[in-house]
Image: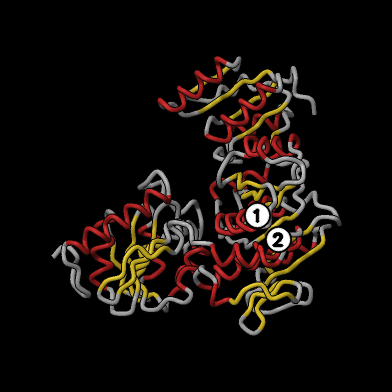
Amino acid sequence: MKFAGQRVLVAGLGVSGFAAARCLLTLEAKVKVTESGASPELAERADRLRSLGAEVELGGHDLSDLDADLAIVSPGIPLTSELFKVLSERGVPVWSEIELAYRLAECEFLAVTGTNGKTTTTSLLASILERGGVPSLAAGNIGLPLVEAIASVPQGGAIALEVSSFQLATIDTFAPRVAVLLNVAEDHMDSHGSMAGYIAAKARITENQGPSDVLVFNADDPICVEIAARSSARKLPFSAASLSVRGAGIKEGWIVVDERRVIEADALPLPGRAGIEDAMAAAAAGLVFGVELEAVRGALSDFRPLGHRLETVASVDGVSFIDDSKATNPHATLAAVKGLSDVVLIAGGRSKGIDLSPLASTVPPVIAVIAIGEARGEVVDVFSGLVDVQVADNMREAVSLAMSRSIRAGSVLLSPGCASLDMYESYVARGEDFARCVRELIDDGFRRGESGDS
């Protein structure tokens, strides 16, 4: 598609929207940007785009003035919003920034999606590509916006791309050379409207793949298996429970891909079954792309866990304090408690319309729960009658209550199963607050079975 002279509406002035608008202006498109928010940072971005020739409106979307040849819509705008409805009624094609970048790129794409584990797997895959000597970057939901990343990766190189359901919902021709589908569990019901809508969005990662492309998928996840069955790509299943021929799995304590030993599972620097699955998927994707086995093994061995994902922030008096703030849905929390014992769980936040009842299956190893945030009432309902449940109004109170209920060789685990935006600007801020409160209360003289404020 030639963009010169085309009227392109960019909805959302976040990082990806700003990058898309600048890219389109260099392609001589007629760009209009619409942003519902207003802040000094957004005003600065708006001024920069106006200086380049864009029309920019802040503080709301003028739905009466959405005529365009194409719309690039931010993943932060819900698919159920009035903006999407009006664009659809007017027949305006809607793309994500991912689609725009894909059409402009010369490099290959290895794309990763799933309800949980996307960032870790994409980071692993980026490390594998770099270790294998492939000109590469990590981009999308991790690292640079994709329209900026493609300018730095030449033909013959590859981008390890983390893609969300929101970005996939508005692709058109996007077809990664290797697609990785980690898992699919209930999430983002507030934006997709239903579980069926969410699954359909995730499935689009393989929608345009052909027989020369590869789909790496979780054979232990029924929804992933169902999506794979409809794909035209070559399939490479992975499983932490079994080992299929020409797939990835565990054999004699080793992660094995296509009958090749990659790394001993116990040697992985990632915790639990979730860590094994992420490593297995990244290894399979790297190997099938052509990275040498030794490079894959070295990248996995040297990798270090990302912040706020099962990160131990302190250990004192036999109790481990673990930050898993990135667990923003129940499926992630269920994965987090596997392999732990005697867990005091801090859970809650903004539920995003998700059913929190699956959290009940964390008992055991969960022995007590501290409920926080907007969804604290829902958390109390889930655990009532199963374990002791207390409600906290802030993180310091939550950590103090959790400390008082912890036992030796156990854990205090922040794994909320909910989004952070009711109390914090991001899951990162939530995790940092947890770590700060843990350190402060330990300094105040924490002892097991006593309030950290004593």
Q: Secondary structure at mark 2?
A: helix
Where residue 450 sits: x, y (%)? 18, 72
Q: Which residue is mark 2?
A: 285
Q: Which residue is mark 1?
A: 112
Q: Quadrant of residue 418?
A: bottom left
Where residue 258 sits: x, y (%)? 76, 72
Is the Cβ of the residue at disc 2 closer than 8 Å to that at disc 1? yes
Q: Quadrant of residue 310?
A: bottom left
Where residue 100 sits: x, y (%)? 70, 35
User: Of label 2 and label 1, which has the lower sequence position?
Assistant: 1
303, above or below 103, in the image: below
User: In the drawing, does residue 111 fall left or right of residue 81?
Assistant: right
Residue at screen point 70% across, 32% down: 88
The answer to whether residue 216 is visible is: yes
Q: Secondary structure at mark 1?
A: strand
Name which residue type carries label 1. Answer: Val
Circle count: 2
Q: Quadrant of residue 446?
A: bottom left
